[in-house]
Image (cartoon, rainbow, N blue to C red):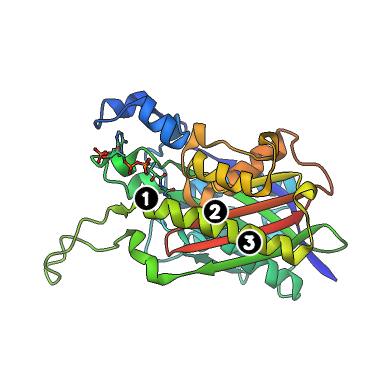
Amino acid sequence: MLRSRIIGTGSYVPEKVLTNRDLEGMVETSDEWISTRTGIRERRISAGETASGMAARAAKAALKAAGLSAKDIDLVVVGTVTAEMAFPSVACLIQAELGIKAGAAAFDVSAACSGFLYALDIADRYLRSGGAGKALVIGVDKFSNLIDWKDRSTCVLFGDGAGAAVLSAEKGSRGVLSCRIHSDGRHWDTLYCRASRPDNPFEKGNEQPYLVMNGNETFKIAVRTMGQAIKEVMEDTGLKPEDISLLIPHQANMRIINAARERLKLPEERVYTNLDRYGNTSAASIPIALDEAVRDGKVKDNDIILFVAFGGGLTWASAAVRW
Ligand SMILES: CC(C)(COP(=O)(O)OP(=O)(O)OC[C@H]1O[C@@H](n2cnc3c(N)ncnc32)[C@H](O)[C@@H]1OP(=O)(O)O)[C@@H](O)C(=O)NCCC(=O)NCCS
């Protein structure tokens, strides 16, 4: 039986650091409010970089870690909602930038903060069915482009970045054990960003294309859906909480992460967090955290890693992987 094994990871965050103190000079907020309500202390902001540029850096690092060349890749799936172009996709731009062979399949998936797990699920199905041998799965977002920097209720939460993983179809017990993706479009207006162009003369009354969020509602739905998603992959695999070596949740809010941790009764050291340094990087948050955990030596062969995410759509997703 074929499984999709993650054989290399990489990530990239922009150099520019925007601290909570910096935000105090931009909107009426405080380091104390942001850190106690969210756990975020600083985030990275891309100045002049594109989503595909950040993704390419993460992808190159992942290929290097996997010991592969771009020519080995058959499939590129990118989770993003902040592509620099309406078309082509970030995936096609990555294909050109990295020199991935012509004729490979490359496309983007729109699932906001669940984007990486959606991309992982799709790639996993291609690999297990023999449709591809090696896949590049990327999560990248540049939310600094979507944010209303005068809106304190949203601008303190997000940051920019990219993360990537190389997957290989292999026989054996290691790899993706279960992956689940879900959505409920009825709640689209809980968290959204219009793609309208306010200067189109034929479309009067277009809103500014800024991110809009009902924070309290998003919080409640996130806690509920993440709990359900975790339960699902545990049931699929027969895993018990004590089998989980590391939970890597979407990095949106420390209080949401703690709710997921408490549900599994996991000690703090078995949950990876980096949102204090990067905030919510949307589709990039899980692959950046995974790459850091791997580099920190927190992930060992045959460890069971659990991923869980939620985001605009609304979407939510989870995966269990034997490393
Ligand atoms: C956004 C969030 C941190 C707000 O926390 P909260 O404890 O629910 O806070 P509230 O929304 O109740 O706001 C409390 C007060 O703080 C104020 N406030 C909001 N943002 C603020 C900021 N950056 N600084 C200071 N005060 C702020 C509000 O205006 C409100 O003031 P009021 O009581 O005078 O009306 C929280 O709801 C959250 O994390 N939601 C999920 C968001 C998320 O994860 N989004 C991404 C999904 S992928």
- Residue carrying label 3: 120
Asked if the residue at tag 3 contacts the one at tag 2, i.e. Cβ–Cβ closer than 8 Å, the answer is no
Q: Is mark 1 within 8 Å of ligand 1?
A: yes
Residue 75 relative to residue 313: left or right: right
- Residue carrying label 1: 216
Please provide percent x and percent y for residue 216: 37, 50
- Front residue of 268/280: it is 268
Q: Is mark 2 within 8 Å of ligand 1?
A: no
Q: Say if residue 60 shows up in the picture.
A: no
Quadrant holding the N terminus: bottom right
- Front residue of 11/217: it is 217
Q: Is mark 3 within 8 Å of ligand 1?
A: no
Query: In the figure, residue 167 lies in which quadrant?
Result: bottom right
Please provide percent x and percent y for residue 52: 48, 52
- Residue carrying label 2: 139
Q: Is residue 1 above or below residue 61?
A: below
Disc 1 vs disc 3: which is toward the camera? 1
Cα separation, mark 2 vs mark 3, equals 9 Å
- Front residue of 65/32: it is 32
Mark 2 lies on a secondary structure that is strand
Cα separation, mark 1 vs mark 3, equals 29 Å
Q: Say if residue 140 shows up in the picture.
A: yes
Give the mark nearest the N terminus, 2 or 3. 3
Disc 2 vs disc 1: which is toward the camera? 1
Query: In the figure, residue 236 lies in which quadrant?
Result: bottom right
Give the mark nearest the N terminus, 1 or 3. 3
Mark 3 lies on a secondary structure that is helix
Classed neighbour count for the residue bearing mark 2: other residues with Cα under 10 Å, few (<14), some (14–19), many (≥20) = many
Question: Hey, what amino acid is under mark 2?
Answer: Gly
Mark 1 lies on a secondary structure that is helix
Asked if the residue at tag 1 contacts the one at tag 2, i.e. Cβ–Cβ closer than 8 Å, the answer is no
